């Protein structure tokens, strides 16, 4: 089954304690991205990756890091989480094409609470 | 810069009645438009998209959307709502910044409540 998986699904942590949220897709997609979802703001892109070893900032990258060492994985790293990073996080992937024809596939989400 | 507006935070409709979830957009160039649905505790699922061609696009679960270039709108519609359609709906537009159009800009979302 084609899918995007994220782990953990729920996480409560304290300010400053480094954490990683994993994301994996089995569709051989080139493009992967991370979003955060906050009420009334829709989804805002944090980082994206066009392919292995190619990453770039989205609209709200501050406080986050990513890496893309393998095509299927795209972990999100919070080096020193703060309460304003409490949010619902989604990983997504899509087949790259010129012009963005194809839809994105989303993971189930990770609800992060930073106290 | 492109943007998407969903003017209604919530839409209430009775089961069996037609529903409309509104979306307007602002882009330079030709818009690629998408609708996604989010059920409770789930990720976003793709419903339909408009790239080119017929202004009326049909998608999953009986939903359709009408592209109106003059009004820069892409409203989501369904002729007869089901209670199971209750969910959060997002409109999105292709974002051409920096990476060949793979990015999406999302609206704020509209919660659809279908009452029995």
Image (tube, rainbow, N blue to C red):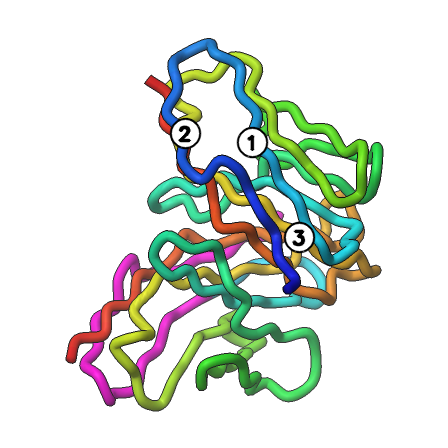
Residue hosting label 2: A11
In the rendered view, does A19 fall on the left or right side of B9?
right
- Taking the image as drawn, is residue A62 in sight? no
Q: Do labels 1 and 3 touch, CB within 8 Å?
A: no
| Chain for disc number 2 | A
Dots 1, 2 in contact, CB < 8 A: yes
Residue displayed at 73% across by 66% down: A101
Q: Position of residue A1 (x, y in %)?
A: 64, 64
Identify the magenta region: B1-23
Q: Is residue B12 left or right of residue A61?
A: left
Whole-number angstrom distance, CA of label 1 to CA of label 3: 25 Å
Residue wearing tag 1: A21
Which quarter of the picture shows residue A13? top left
In this figure, which residue is indicated by the disc labeled 3? Answer: B95
Q: Could you confirm whether marks 1 and 3 are on the same chain? A: no
Q: Is residue A20 above or below residue B92?
A: above
Q: Residues within 10 Å of mark 1 (few under 14, many from 20)?
A: many
| A87, above or below B55, in the image | above
Q: Is residue B74 visible?
A: yes
Between residue B34 and residue A64, name the one nearer to us: A64
């Amino acid at each position: 089954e084609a899918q995007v998986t994220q782990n953990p699904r729920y996480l409560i942590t304290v300010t400053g304690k480094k954490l990683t949220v994993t994301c994996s897709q089995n569709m051989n997609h080139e493009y992967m991205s991370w979003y955060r979802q906050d009420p009334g703001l829709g989804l805002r892109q944090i980082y994206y990756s066009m392919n292995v070893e190619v990453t770039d900032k989205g609209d709200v990258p501050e406080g986050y890091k990513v890496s893309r060492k393998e095509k299927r994985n795209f972990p999100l790293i919070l080096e020193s989480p703060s309460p304003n990073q409490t949010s619902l996080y989604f990983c997504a992937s899509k087949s790259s094409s010129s012009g963005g024809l194809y839809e994105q596939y989303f993971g189930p989400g990770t609800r992060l609470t930073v106290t | 810069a492109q943007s998407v507006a969903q003017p209604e935070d919530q839409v209430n409709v009775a089961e069996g009645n037609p529903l409309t979830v509104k979306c307007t957009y602002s882009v330079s160039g030709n818009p690629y438009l998408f609708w996604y649905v989010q059920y409770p505790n789930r990720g976003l699922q793709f419903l339909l998209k408009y790239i080119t061609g017929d202004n009326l696009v049909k998608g999953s679960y009986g939903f359709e959307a009408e592209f109106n270039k003059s009004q820069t709108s892409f409203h989501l519609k369904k002729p007869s709502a089901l209670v199971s359609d209750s969910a959060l709906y997002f409109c999105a537009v292709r974002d051409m910044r920096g990476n060949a159009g793979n990015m999406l800009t999302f609206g704020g979302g509209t919660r659809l409540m279908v009452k029995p």
